[in-house]
Amino acid sequence: FKHMIKLAPEGYPFILVFGALTVAAFFLPWRVAVVPPLVLTLFMVYFFRDPERQIPKEDGYISPADGRVIVVKKIYEKEFLKKDALLISIFMSPLDVHVNRAPCDGRVEAVRHTSGSFKKAFLEEAFLKNENTAMLLECGGEKVLVRQVAGFLARRTVCRVKPGDNLKRGERYGMIKFSSRLDIYLPDDVNVKVKIDGRVKAGETILAVKAPK
């Protein structure tokens, strides 16, 4: 229960609005009118929860998002990395924690927001066409790209950092509002530790480790 008390700051406007509607509905003659705004208020509290996480001591790139792994494949990333990379995509349902965390210690080299469509986030073409915010990190001599992808319900990605900022492994850096997807591009020679349909937790699950030299 104590882990559910902390909330992402982006959630307070939603909670206050639906909370106010709940109070207003209480004074209506129809008591049942209080149920919909109350349910929505409780859902907003649940959705914007921001639990603490135990960052693993073991080396490796950790998951930047909670959810289900839907893509693990090698791909040529042409916008930022301009080379082959390992793409791992994580789909977040409305029931998952939506706060995003840094996969490694690193310096933010670029942040770019791209407008687009709002196709369902689990579709193959979503990462190409949907509205998204990409963050490029320099992590110990390697480039890592993390892309927050808006989905059918998620209409806004939130990135709290800017170029020049330094992030610690597992540090919060943003979130995506409502169901969505997060893509992470890692060096293509890493050893993958997750599988398709596997569940991952931001800040705790190790996605991959560097290949031995």
Image: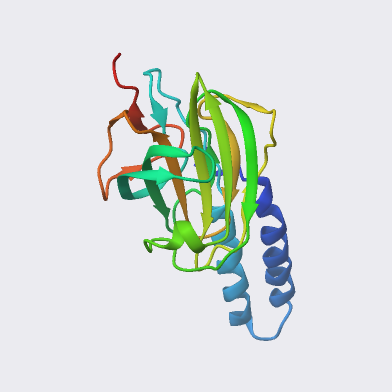
Residue at figure coordinates x 38%, y 38% from the top left: 84
- Up-down relation of residue 132 to residue 169 (above or below): below
Residue 93 appears in view? yes
Q: Position of residue 177 (x, y in %)?
A: 58, 57
Work out whether residue 203 or residue 73 is closer to the camera in this orientation and state it.
73
Query: Quadrant of the rendered structure where residue 205 is?
Result: top left
| Apparent side of residue 186 relative to residue 44 in the rendered image (left or right) | left
Which residue sits furthest bottom?
A: 29
| Apparent side of residue 196 relative to residue 32 in the rendered image (left or right) | left
Residue 94 appears in view? no
| Apparent side of residue 177 relative to residue 210 in the rendered image (left or right) | right
Q: Position of residue 11 (x, y in %)?
A: 65, 53
- Name the quarter where the C terminus is drawn: top left
| Apparent side of residue 62 relative to residue 80 in the rendered image (left or right) | left
Q: Position of residue 79 (x, y in %)?
A: 53, 45
- Up-down relation of residue 28 to residue 108 (above or below): below
